[in-house]
Image (cartoon, rainbow, N blue to C red):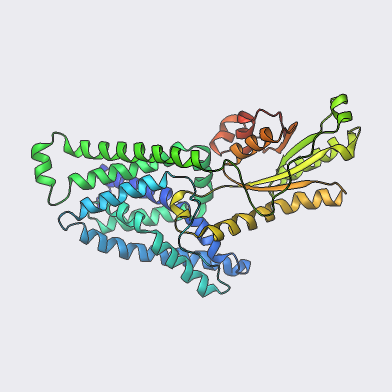
Amino acid sequence: MVVDISNPQFWIAVMQIIAIDIVLGGDNAVVIALACRRLPERQRRLGIIWGVAGAIGLRVILIFFALQLLAVPFLKVAGAALLVWIGVKMMQPEASEGGHDVEASGTLFGAIKTVIIADAVMSLDNVIAIAGAAKGSLGLVIFGLVASVPIIVWGSKFVMKLMDRYPVVIVLGGGLLGWIAGDMTVTDVALKEWMAANVPGAKWVGPVLGTLLVVGAGKWLASRAISKRPSLVELGQQVAAPAPIPAEVLATGHLGRVLLPVDASDNAARAVEHVLKIRGRHPAPESLDIHLINVQREVTGDISHFIAQKTLQDYHLENSVKALARARKMLEDAGVKFSEHKLVGKPWDVISEYAGTHQFDLIVMGSRGLGSHTGAALGSVALGVAQRSTVPVLLVK
C-alpha cells in the first residue's frame, strides 16, 4: 500500500494500527513500572522515555522484517494462526502462573535495557498484527506507531480502566485481531487467486470468520477459566474474617461493620474522615468494626503469561501498601482500631462481593462528584460498586 493520506484505506489501516497498539500495548505500563520502580523519581521518568523510544525503534525494525516475510507463500496463513491464538489468549483472565520474570533495575541503563528487552519479547503480537494491518507499507507502520506513542504512554492507565469497566473493549480488540487474521489468510500469496475464484466475497468472508472464531473461542475459554479460579484473591498476610457484631449494637440498630474501600486519593481521604465522624456519633465507638480494603486491578492473560506470578504479586502488593498508607495513618492518628485487606481483581466486583460475603452493614466510598454519564465513561469504581452491591453504599463527595 502506497502512503496516500487522501485514500480512505490509508486512514482505516492507521486506525487499525492505533487500535492494535492501544489494546495490546495498554499493559506495557505494567512492564515499565516493574522495570523502573527502584529508580529515583527523575531517573524513572528518563527510564520510561528512553525505554519506550528504544522499544518503538526496535518494533519498527521487527515489523520491517515481518513485512518482507509475509510476502513468502503460506507465511501469512501461519501469521494468521498466531494472531488467532494471541486474540484468544488476550481475552483470558490473569493467569495463575506467569512465565518470564521482569526484574526491577537499580540503574537507569539497566531499566532502559529491561524495558526494551521485555517489549521485544512481548511485541510479537503487535508486530504480526500491525504488519497484517499495514498491507506491505512500512511508511504506514511508522505513521501508525508514531500516532500511537502518546496514547500508549499517557493514556495506558485510562485504557486499562476502560477495559476493566467495559470488558467489551477487550472483546472488540480480540475481534480486531481475528478480522486481520482472516484478511491475512485470504490474501496469502499462495491462496489469493484460488480464494478469489472459488469463495464468493472472500475479502469479507475471511475477516468475518476470523472475528467469530477469536471471539467465540476466547469467551468460551475465559468462562471456563473464571469458573475454576477463586473469586477473591487476597494479597499478603491473611486477615481473620470480621468478628460477629455485638448483640447490644444489633439491638439498637446502629452500625456494626463498615467497609472502607480506599486508595491514595483525596476522595478516599474524605471517606475516611466521614467514617471517623460516624464513629464519633456512634453510641459504642469501640464496637464499630472498620475495615480498609484496596483492590489492585488484575492484568490481562496476555501480560500475566509473560511476567512471573511472584513478581506480579509483589507488584500488586507494593501498590496496595502505598494506596492504603494515607488512610491507615489517618485512622492510626485518630487512635482507631481497624483491619485492612489487599485484594486483586475488578474493584467494583471484588468490593461488592467482599462486602456481601462478610456481611458488612455499610460501604463508604469517596466520589469525584461526577455525573452518571461522565462517571461511567471514566470507569468510576464508586458508581460500579453502587450498581452491583447488595450492601448499602454511602458516597462521600
How far across and down, in percent of the image, does residue 325 sit?
Answer: 73, 54
Is the C terminus in the top left, top right, bottom left or bottom right quadrant? top right
Seen from this angle, which residue lies furthest right? 283
Q: Is residue 227 visible?
A: yes
Please say if 114 is above or below 77.
below
How far across and down, in percent of the image, does residue 298 sit?
Answer: 54, 48
320 displayed left or right of 345: right
Please say if 34 is above or below 283.
below
Relative to the observer, which residue lies in front, 98 or 16? Answer: 98
Residue at screen point 37% across, 45% down: 88
Total labels: the figure holds 0
Residue at screen point 71% across, 28% down: 392
How far across and down, in percent of the image, does residue 104 sit?
Answer: 55, 67
Relative to the observer, which residue lies in front, 308 or 394? Answer: 308
Residue at screen point 17% across, 47% down: 187
256 displayed left or right of 11: right
Q: Is residue 396 visible?
A: no
How far across and down, in percent of the image, does residue 284 sit?
Answer: 91, 35
Q: Quadrant of residue 360?
A: top right
Residue at screen point 14% across, 55% down: 73
181 displayed left or right of 345: left
